[in-house]
Image: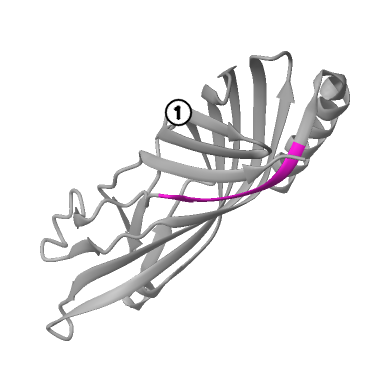
């Protein structure tokens, strides 16, 4: 993961040097994204020995996004917009604790590092854009560890596509994008020596505001 991050940093630095003459801007970015967990039942698949284990998502919340946004303008209409974003994801779960015969609740908080690169066309203050995105899973803290033998599974890196619209108002930029994962996501749990995938919703909406110097 460290090598991947250093590679991205080097590529970004080279890109800045190559395209600075084309019109380079950079600034802070803040935003929110919908949770990747869809509220409702998350049934453990193929759980022949765990028929009564049922985990449900409750009150899936939005994630906070904070980082840097840059823009390389090739001309009045065409631009490239790379970003470096730290993203939080929070979800609340409910499951049946058979050992105690009660329903229990748990909270899960995750941290991700997103690297989207959007190519776009600008028409006055209005923009349309699309491009790839890499998402690195950095850390997860979960109360679900109360389940005996529990372990959470995540892909270290997931690849996705984003597309949407944007608006430029003075030096402020407002973007609304739709993200869809294109890599096979590993999202599930391990209990004991058995692993089970969870049903979840990978697509999400992203709203962000930035300021370009």
Q: Secondary structure at mark 1?
A: strand
- Residue at image position (45%, 56%) is 63
Q: Which residues are magenta?
A: 26-33
Q: Please tell me whether the stretch drawn in magenta is mainly helix, strand or loop.
A: strand
Magenta stretch: residue 32 in it?
yes
Out of 20 and 171, give the one closest to the viewer.
171
| Rendering colour mode | one colour
Task: Say above or below: 40 vs 121.
Answer: below
- Residue with the most extreme bottom position: 100
Residue 92 pos. (x, y %): 31, 67
Tell me the quarter of the picture where residue 102 sits.
Answer: bottom left
Task: Say above or below: 188 vs 207.
Answer: below
The residue wearing badge 1 is 164
- Residue at image position (78%, 42%) is 6
Residue 29 pos. (x, y %): 63, 47
In-image side of 191 versus 175 (left or right): left
- Residue at image position (26%, 51%) is 38
In-image side of 129 versus 181 (left or right): right
């Amino acid at each position: 993961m460290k090598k991947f991050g250093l590679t991205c940093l080097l590529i970004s630095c080279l890109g800045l040097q190559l395209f600075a003459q084309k019109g380079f801007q950079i600034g802070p970015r803040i935003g929110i994204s919908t949770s990747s967990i869809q509220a409702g039942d998350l049934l453990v698949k193929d759980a022949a020995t765990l028929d009564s284990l049922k985990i449900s998502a409750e009150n899936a919340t939005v994630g906070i996004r904070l980082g840097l946004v840059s823009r390389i303008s090739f001309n009045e209409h065409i631009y490239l917009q790379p970003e470096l974003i730290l993203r939080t994801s929070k979800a609340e779960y409910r499951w049946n604790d058979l050992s105690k015969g009660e329903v229990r609740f748990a909270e899960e908080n995750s941290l991700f590092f997103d690297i989207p690169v959007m190519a776009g066309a600008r028409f006055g203050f209005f923009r349309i854009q699309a491009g790839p995105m890499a998402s690195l899973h950095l850390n997860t803290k979960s109360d679900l560890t109360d389940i005996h033998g529990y372990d959470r599974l995540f892909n270290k890196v997931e690849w996705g596509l984003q597309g949407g619209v944007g608006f430029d108002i003075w030096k402020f930029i407002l973007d609304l994008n739709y993200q869809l994962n294109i890599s096979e996501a590993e999202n599930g749990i391990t209990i004991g020596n058995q692993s089970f995938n969870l049903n979840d919703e990978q697509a999400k909406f992203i709203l962000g505001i930035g300021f370009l110097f």
